[in-house]
Amino acid sequence: MSTLQTRSGRKTVEAAPSRRLMIWTAVFVVAAMLPIVAGPSYYVTVLINLLIRLPFTLSLSYVIGRLGLFTMAHSAFLGIGAYVAAILAQRYGVNPWLTLPASVAASAAVAAFIGFAVLRLKGLFLAVSTLAFALFIEVLVRQSEITGGAYGITDIPPLTIAGTPIRGILFYELALAALALTVILFWNIKNSPFGRAGTAAQDNEHAAAAAGINVARVRIAGFTLSAAVAGLSGWLYAFYHLTVNPFLFSLDLTFVALFMVLIGGLGSMVGVAIGTTLLSLGPELIGFATTQQVLASGVLVLIVVLLAPRGIGGLINEFNSRKAWRKDGDVRSSVTPAA
Amino acid sequence: MEFLPQIMISGAQVGCIYAMMALSYFIILSATGILNFAQGEWMMLSAVLGVVLLALGLPYPIAILVSVAATVAVCQFFEWSVIRPLQRRNADMTILVVALLGILVVVRYSVGLTFGREDVPIPGAFEPTPIILGSSAFIQPQTLVIYVATALTFGALWLFLQRTWFGRSFRIAAIDPIGAQVVGVNLARIRFSSFAIGAAIAAILGWLYAPLYAAGYGIGAAPGVKGFIALLVGGVGSPWGSLAGGMLLGLFEVATAYYVGSLWSEGIGFALLMVFLIFWPSGLLGGMRGR
């Protein structure tokens, strides 16, 4: 594994993927066996909520860390996915499985539409524009008839397989499968020309354009893709909790997710996974964000920003780099000073 | 059509609020290039502190002074402990934005946990009896206070930026930070002062806003965003941009509420933002030179 020093931080590039692949596969197999061995309990609930949240934060980490687009509309895309699923399944009686492509497509479509207008902005301006969009969607959903107004939609029919509703351990496996797909997706993107184009555009827009990369298209594509994954998270949420309400659109969710991403380390999948797990398993998880949880994550993020700006992922990279350097003094993997 | 005078009055009132919010963003943005998300929270903090101080029996003007001063102090604490170290090591924009969000969240939810989640009323400067104007319009005294305060604030800031030596160094720092340092402008002091001025403007706004709406831990959220929209719509090149953008947004919002319905009056802000982003990104009065 080698590390490239780019302007937006250190990015890892895989030289020998097979060992990593084995580790990841092992992790997922163990995770899949976990509830079967441990038995149904409160912990399965907590873990399922974590599994629903992970694709959300991974996609956010991708769009902020690897594309350099600071978006605060992510929870809006999760909410759109959840509500589309809920409306189609509960109000129109559509088969719950068929709502999956609809959810994902809806989030992606809205993202593409917004993206055209908003992705030309940079940094802070992009952030607040997406914030304004998120607030607008929240107001819209809160007021409309079809979304159930302030109460949302309840009694969503659950997913069924061969007649049995998917709950508990079965849902755990489903969510785990979704997470595995997400990880595979982002892993492949990271090492693909498309992913590298995104990072190039993030580092130096003009150089990337000069090299023939269509910066606007890469950005819109990446943004849309991450919104689609957020929609997937929303779909999972809808069919697990079987109720959706406008709280899904609240900015609290976005803030906590942003903090998880930063604490985990931008662009580092493992780091973000750890960060998400840490912040999710803290206080007991009934909803997605309670006041104390948001406050705690805010304080934590300030600490991380001041003391370890590259987050947990950065610390892991540091650790790996130092280990490699000490092992064989190889110049290629020598440590460069942390930011 | 007979609503027009009332729409103008209410629109101007809302417009002043957004203009003040936009101005508090502007002064920090133009002096340091930082868009401080937490401005809405300073507005909230000063209003909430105001409620507490008034409940403790302080006279109205003293309560205003103390709450504004306390809010500025809290803001400066965060500037010193968070922003300054980040600037010193030239941190990424992303990290800076997340830090600002962290501050926003910490302030908002600390207040929420300490003072509770309900919105409480806070009295205005005068008795809230409406003054009837003509056949179909009335105006609250607090609205007049808002007009006057806004005019005074913009006027004072203009004088500061144009006529004082320190204020002119703000403008130089905005146009060309490196050149400003070459001629001896202390950017750190400018950043510190701009944060203080911005927080003060937001804190004053708290006393204008809360008597007409409410004081509670969440009141900073919506005006914060609308203030930014006003800033972008009006243009970041000068403080008058904030005024223009605020007024435009306020009038549109109120007119939409009257003629179409309150659902869409929330949406008009975002629609306006989108239109300006696509067709007129530098805003009504133009963007900054240099930065």
Image: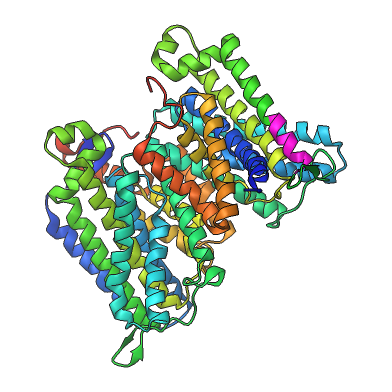
Q: How many marks?
A: 0
Q: Residue at x 35, y 77 (%)?
A: A172
Taking depth in this image into account, of A22 and A112 the one nearest to the observer is: A112
Query: Does A64 appear in magenta?
Result: no
Residue A175 on image: x %, y %: 33, 73
The colour style of the image is: rainbow
Could you tell me which residue is drawn at 77 percent across and 34 percent down? B64
Dividing the picture into quarters, in which one does residue A179 lie? Answer: bottom left
Q: Quadrant of residue A45?
A: bottom left
Residue occupying the point 74% across, 34% down: B145
Going by the image, does B168 lie left or right of B152? left
Would residue B142 be counted in the magenta stretch? yes
Q: Position of residue B149 (x, y in %)?
A: 70, 30
The residues colored magenta run B138-149
Residue B254 visible at all: yes
At which x and y percent is residue A15?
A: 12, 49
Question: Farthest top residue?
Answer: B183
A40 relative to A321, above or below: below
User: Does the rendering let one see residue A330?
Assistant: no
Q: Which secondary structure class fits the magenta region best?
A: helix
> Is residue A50 or residue B44 the one in the foreground?
B44
Relative to B71, is A117 above or below? below
Quadrant, the C terminus of chain B: top left
Residue nearest the observer in this picture, B73 or A120: A120
Q: Position of residue B221 (x, y in %)?
A: 57, 48
Q: Depth check: A158 or A18 in front?
A: A158
Kindly identify the residue that appears in the image at 59 percent across and 30 percent down: B198
Q: Is residue B205 left or right of residue B263?
A: right
Q: Quadrant of residue B24?
A: top right
